[in-house]
Every structure is written in structure tokens, then in C-alpha cells.
Amino acid sequence: MSLTIDGANNALLDTNSNEFLKVSATASAVNEFTATNAATGNPPKLSATGGDTNISYQIQPKGTGTTQILDGNGNEVIIAGAAVASAVNEVTVTNAATGNDPSIAATGGDTNIDLNLQGKGSGGVVIGSGGAAITKCLKGSTTWDPGSIADAAATSTTVTVTGAVAGNPCIVSHTQLGANAVMLTGHVSAADTVTVVLFNKTGGAFDCASGTLNAFVFQI
């Protein structure tokens, strides 16, 4: 294939005189791309280079197009989704030195940002090789003052967890239990409802102060 330079349009043309690559001029530009070839067994490289000390580089699709990274067989590995109007939050992937963990983090303009990991269809998210897929983690919270509980006695309450289904596994916690010898258990007793039981085994009366009761329900 032969290439032709179209100086009038800052373009590189293919054999059919169609645009193959275009370059836009920037006044007082000091940064650029450098393409480096490679010897056998090594990958070629496209780098940001120039006068600045630290230089990021951007890849931008057009319109609703996506940015795609393919494997050696041409199959999609990573797709950066279509444009979101007025987007201010994003995902940042950070590598790490020896002895430290790389990270995938929610970053952006908002102060508090959740990170949404989602399987396709009925698929879930698997943590660790061979782990069980979690399709959803639900949470419900309420203020609860259990009051005074005699030794070997129990008290209970309920927490609304929208979407919970009987049989879903759950975890419960209370902010005022501390290191006391008590047991806090919970189970999904009905749709959208977690029943929580606090059992006192301290050897004497136990008066738990009012605090936040949290219930986490997992759908797998």
C-alpha cells in the first residue's frame, strides 16, 4: 500500500486517495505523539512526548461511538461506553509497586461516588477465582435502641431491605455493640424484610445504647 500526503487538508491518504490519518494544528504546541517500532519479540509503542514534564494522552471516539481494545484475535477485551452528557465521574485504574495492590477506583467531580460492578443478564460479580457470583448487594438501615436485656434473653426488630427475598443470605451490624459478649443475627423473614435478633450472653443485664442497625442482603 502506498500513502500520499495531502498537505492542504493535513491528511495522509491511502492508495484509493481516502483519508487514512488527519492531523490538526494547535498554536504553540509543545506536546505530540511518538510512534516507535520494535525488533522481534517486542511490541511497537505509541507514546505521548514533548516539552511538558507530565503528559497524558486522550483517545476520543465520535458521537455515540465507543473506544475498544481488542485481543490478538480481534475480539473485544475492554469497551469504554458511549458518551454520557455532562459526565463528571469516571473510573481510574492505578498500577502498583512491589508489595502493593493495583486499584480500580471511582473518581471524578462528585464528593461521594459509588462504583457499579454489574454482570450481564442473570450473571453476577465473582470475587476471587472459584468464588460465587453475587448479582446484587442490598442494604437497609434503621435506628434501633434495644434497651436493657436480661442475661440469656433476647430482643428483636425488623429492618426494611427493599428487594430482599426469603432465603437470601444476610449480614447485620449495630454501631453500639462494641466488644460485648452478645450475638446479633439476622435473616430475611419475608419479602423486603430482615428480622434481627440480639441475644445477651454477658452473664448479666446488658443495656445497648441506641445506634444504627444495618442489614446487608446478598443475592447470588
Image: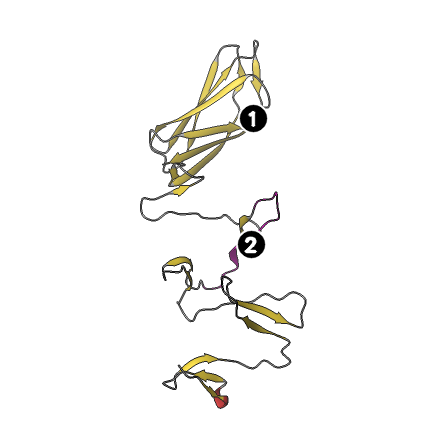
Measured as percent of width and height from the top left, residue 133 is found at: 38, 39
Nearest the eye: 19 or 111: 19
209 in the magenta segment: no
Cα gap from disc 2 to disc 1, whole angstroms: 32 Å
Q: Is tag 2's residue or tag 1's residue first in the polypeptide sequence?
A: 2
Which of the image's four quarters has the C terminus?
top left
Measured as percent of width and height from the top left, residue 71 is found at: 40, 59
- Please determine whether, in this image, residue 130 is positioned above or below residue 58: above
Query: What is the image's colouring?
Result: secondary structure
88 in the magenta segment: yes
**Crowd tier of the residue under label 1, counting other residues whose Cα lies within 10 Å: few below 14, some 14–19, many 20 or above:** some
Give the residues in magenta: 85-101
Residue located 58% across and 80% down the image:
26
Measured as percent of width and height from the top left, residue 32 is found at: 59, 74
**The residue under label 1 is which amino acid type?**
Ser
Nearest the eye: 144 or 8: 8
Residue 134 is drawn in which quadrant? top left
Give the secondary structure at mark 2.
loop
Q: Residue furthest left?
A: 121
- Please determine whether, in this image, residue 104 is positioned above or below residue 173: below
Give the secondary structure at mark 1.
loop
Nearest the eye: 56 or 70: 70
Measured as percent of width and height from the top left, residue 72 is found at: 40, 60
Please give left or right for residue 213 compared with residue 138 in the image. right
**The residue under label 2 is which amino acid type?**
Asp
- Please determine whether, in this image, residue 142 is positioned above or below residue 33: above
Nearest the eye: 211 or 202: 202
Please give left or right for residue 67 compared with residue 99 in the image. left
Residue located 50% across and 89% down the image:
7
Q: Which residue, given by chain and number where applicable, does mark 1 sit on? A: 210
Which of the image's four quarters has the N terminus?
bottom left
Marker disc for residue 110: 2
